[in-house]
Image (cartoon, helix red, strand yellow):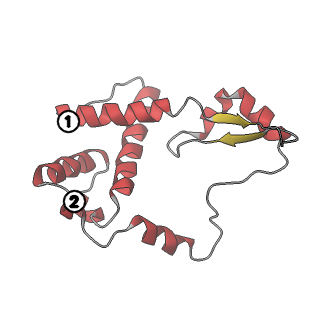
Amino acid sequence: MIKKTLILAITLLIAFNSYSQLLWEITGKDLDKPSYLFGTHHAIPVVFLDSLPQLYKCYNQCSTVIGEVIINQEDMGQRLVAAASMPYKIDKYLTEDEYALVDSVMQEYLGFPLIYVENLRPSMISNMIGMAILEKLDSNLKTGGQMDT
């Protein structure tokens, strides 16, 4: 229980700290006008953008916008699966206790065991768990409930 609470606290700390310092202005002596670097985490809901009034002002001043991922390529699905997968099962990297902990968290928040995604990279599994925790937290906050840990 303490480990689950610690994992939740660290995930939430990372997520909520990512809300700050999202929009950076880039200037320099050789730049005619400023450029902007904007970064979010995919867990942040789109409505969050409304809380950043400077974002739209800067966006409207831009002549070019560059996104992080181009998803219109025919083989993008295959490429994403290949990038998310690893040749070894995750149990090669975890102790039995660590595997059991991750498995129990996955079953609690995602509703399926770790064995279903054992060939995914740890970062992908972590993202899945983090998204599920944030989704549950968001749902509980909207209904006025509290998150069980």
Q: Which quadrant of the view contains residue 25?
A: top right
Q: Which quadrant of the view contains residue 95?
A: bottom left
Percent coordinates x, y for residue 29 in the rendering: 82, 38
Residue 139 appears in the picture as rendered:
no
Which residue is denoted by mark 2 in the rendering? 93
Identify the disc placed on residue 3. Answer: 1
- The CA span between labels 2 and 1 is 18 Å
At horizontal 23% and vertical 36% (from top left) the residue drawn is 4
At horizontal 78% and vertical 38% (from top left) the residue drawn is 28
Q: Is residue 86 left or right of residue 70?
A: left
Element carrying mark 1: helix
- Dots 2, 1 in contact, CB < 8 A: no
Percent coordinates x, y for residue 69 in the rendering: 61, 59
Q: Quadrant of the C terminus?
A: top left
Name the residue nearer the viewer: 9 or 111: 9
Q: Residues within 10 Å of mark 1 (few under 14, many from 20)?
A: few
Dot in front, 2 or 1: 2
Q: Is residue 92 above or below residue 6?
A: below
Residue 80 appears in the picture as rendered:
yes
Q: Is residue 141 above or below residue 3?
A: above
Q: Amino acid at mark 2?
A: Tyr
The numbered mark, 2 or 1, whose residue comes first in the sequence reads 1
Q: Amino acid at mark 1?
A: Lys
What is the residue that sits farthest to the left in this orientation?
A: 96
